[in-house]
Amino acid sequence: MAASIHCDSMGIAFTRGSRRTMLKKSLRRALASHRQAGERDPYLEDPSTFWALRDVSFSVGTGTVLGLCGPNGSGKTTLLRTISGIYQPDVGSLSVSGRTSVLLSLGATLAANLSGRVNAQMSAALHGVPSAQAEEHVQHVQEFAELDDAAMETPVRYYSAGMRARLAFASASVLEPEILLVDELLGVGDAAFRKKSGDRLQELTGTAHCVMIASHSMPFLQSLCDRVLWLEAGQLMADGPPDEVLEAYSRRSAGAAAVPTTARSRPGD
Amino acid sequence: MHVRIFWRLTAASLRTYSSQRLLGWAWWLLDPLALIAVYALVFGDWLNLRAGPEGANYPFFLACALIPWRWYSLATRRGGMGFVTSSTLLNSTLVNRRVVVTSQAAAATVESLLGVGVLLIMMLVYDRPWSPTLLTLAVPLAVMALHILAVSYALAPLMAMLPDLGNAHEVGLRLLFFLTPCLYSLERVPEAFRSWYVALNPLVGIIEGIRRPLYEDLPPLWGALGWSALWGVLLLLVGNWIFKRLSNDAIRML
């Protein structure tokens, strides 16, 4: 099956303020018998709502390495979490087809008190590897992560940052997912690991997979991606070839103004 | 697939617990034994409940209620904290949230199973006969499991949104403990209030339903257990509704 992601006018909202405000708002939403979508602009200013993603639209198909750039807090991780299914869009629609594997932060899915082997077994279960193939999966993870038997039996809390990165990346990437979502992971670790993980990503895309990578490293995105999305304050500022988008982003970072590609006038603007 | 993830998460939770402690699994045995010893001393000997309807075998009387009570309190606490303790996993991997919460409650259930060993030893010590009545235990145990799931599903998203609920849960459990016939016999509750007491406290039927076959070789009080089962079904409906409606918002607050 061809892997694809279609995102149409998608928005993700967070409630800001005290926990009481958040709970009150969630309960009010939960008790509402029906949605009132379409009756008014969902993005209308509401001081207690923070839109982490606003009106984001794009499509990506098989064989694409899509980069995500933008400053901290621009919505890159939220977008990856939404595509992976962790968050549900509040506005707009999202359709994802293909087996998805997600690598959201350095070793985030690793349980620190458990050994590398147990963590690899857990990742096999979480990614739906059949029991009969679980040991084979652990072997592949161990080989790719270049961890010896002693390291695999050691609790992950004793691992160096590089070892954690290798184990986490290996656990997610040896599975050959149809869609691989990566957040900031590849900028860490030693040069050899960065090269190895980059090669692996290219290998994955070569076998008709779809990869989305969020990174602050522009040379990294430029060398690996076919296309780059630039997010800022939750809005899609640009979507295009890496050279153009990264250059525009660099100019913006240096102080020049930018206008979101998806911006449209709203009531009250 | 969900079943395999469930087992993996349950095993990981148990391993994490034991790997962080010097005595590991021994705490799961020491904890109920210490509780039984202290309550037996204070209530059995000093307040002389042994002379009342609780009977001379007061430590065994206590064990029959304290061990299931400990299961209930530990499992609802762990299940209720399921979102908070698994926040990293829930925020970085697409995993069935219900499986995560259930696995936490299941890990607490496995821990509590060691208490069954204590009960078996006490049955031998107090020369308690093995009779078919013991088979009726399956019913109150199933109702208890229903309550644990219902409370865990309700609390998991709520505790992620409002940490104060952790404190409220602790206070509520402490109050409920003294309002449930764990330390004393149901006969001590004034007769005028007893039917209300049984109907309004969902745990009375369960605790009595576990104690009677073990301690008195009598079947559970089916009427009281019926009330507990009814409460369990209602709580499960409410718990499911809360889980379904609030989980998405709760994950964003982790």
Image (tube, coloured by chain):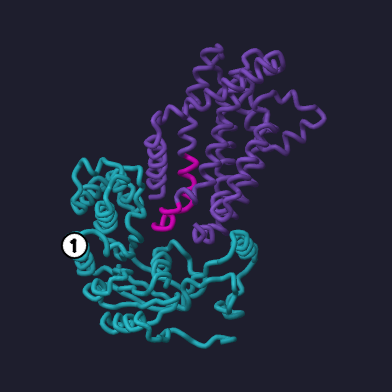
Chain colours: A cyan, B purple
Q: Amino acid at mark 1?
A: Ala
Q: Residue at x 34, y 73 (%)?
A: A68
User: Which chain is indicated by disc 1?
Assistant: A
Q: Which residue is nearer to you in this view: B200 or A213? A: A213
Q: Which residue is nearer to you in this view: B184 or A1? A: B184
Q: Position of residue A32 (x, y in %)?
A: 64, 66
Q: Position of residue B96 (x, y in %)?
A: 44, 53
Q: Which residue is nearer to you in this view: A155 or A25? A: A155
Q: Which residue is nearer to you in this view: A51 or A251? A: A251
Magenta residues, dominant SS class:
helix
Image check: B50 left or right of B116?
A: right
Q: Position of residue A93 (x, y in %)?
A: 46, 73
Q: Residue at x 28, y 71 (%)?
A: A217
Sort mark 1 into few (<14), some (14-19) or many (20+) by Cα contacts within 10 Å: few
- Which residue lies most toward the right here? B192
Task: Give the magenta range.
Answer: B87-106
Q: Residue at x 49, y 35 (%)?
A: B109
Q: Residue at x 58, y 75 (%)?
A: A37
Above or below: residue B31 compared with residue A124? above
Image check: B34 left or right of A255?
A: right
Q: State the count of labels.
A: 1
Is B168 colored magenta in this rendering? no
Find disc 1 in the rendering and name its residue.
A191
Above or below: residue B155 compared with residue A47? above
SS category of the residue bearing label 1: helix
Is B99 colored magenta in this rendering? yes
